[in-house]
Image: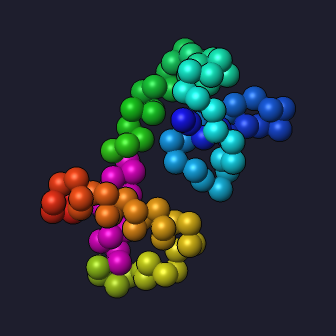
């Protein structure tokens, strides 16, 4: 189920498959509001940008890991929600590939 980001007028302006600080509501993927949002995004070309989101998330994770390994930043300097997400993603990546990549 996607987590929903709404604007001040109550319209969906974004969806996330993981909860964030901005998403407190979730709806089924087939919900009419969700499908209408997805249709609008497709019409605007949003799928092209969205198609790169997953790979950019991986790049960001790798960048944070590199900065931590070089002691440029300390993971504890990041907000706690970011720390939790990075730890979860790292454990999932290690579990799915066996080598952490």
Q: Picture coordinates of residue 66 (x, y %)?
A: 30, 71
Please indicate whether residue 78 sits to the left or right of residue 62 in the image. Answer: right
Residue at 57% from the left image edge and 72% from the top image edge:
79
Q: Is residue 46 above or below residue 18?
A: above
Please indicate whether residue 69 sits to the left or right of residue 25 in the image. Answer: left
Task: Name the main secondary structure of what is drawn in magenta.
Answer: helix
Please indicate whether residue 87 sits to the left or right of residue 21 in the image. Answer: left
Over which residues does the magenta segment extend? 56-68
Residue at 34% from the left image edge and 85% from the top image edge:
71
Q: Let me know if residue 36 is in the magenta part.
A: no
Q: Picture coordinates of residue 17 (x, y %)?
A: 51, 42
Q: Picture coordinates of residue 3 (x, y %)?
A: 60, 40
Q: Let me know if residue 62 is in the magenta part.
A: yes
Please indicate whether residue 97 sits to the left or right of residue 70 in the image. Answer: left
Residue at 56% from the left image edge and 72% from the top image edge:
80
Q: Quadrant of residue 13?
A: top right
Q: Picture coordinates of residue 25 (x, y %)?
A: 69, 42
């Amino acid at each position: 189920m996607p987590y929903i980001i709404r604007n001040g007028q109550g319209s969906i302006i974004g969806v996330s498959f993981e909860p964030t600080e901005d998403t407190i509501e979730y709806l089924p993927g087939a919900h009419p509001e969700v499908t209408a949002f997805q249709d609008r995004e497709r019409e605007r070309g949003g799928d092209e940008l969205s198609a790169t989101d997953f790979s950019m998330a991986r790049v960001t994770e790798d960048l944070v890991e590199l900065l931590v390994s070089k002691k440029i930043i300390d993971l504890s300097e990041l907000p706690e929600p970011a720390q939790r997400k990075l730890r979860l993603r790292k454990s999932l990546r290690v579990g799915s590939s066996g080598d952490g990549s």
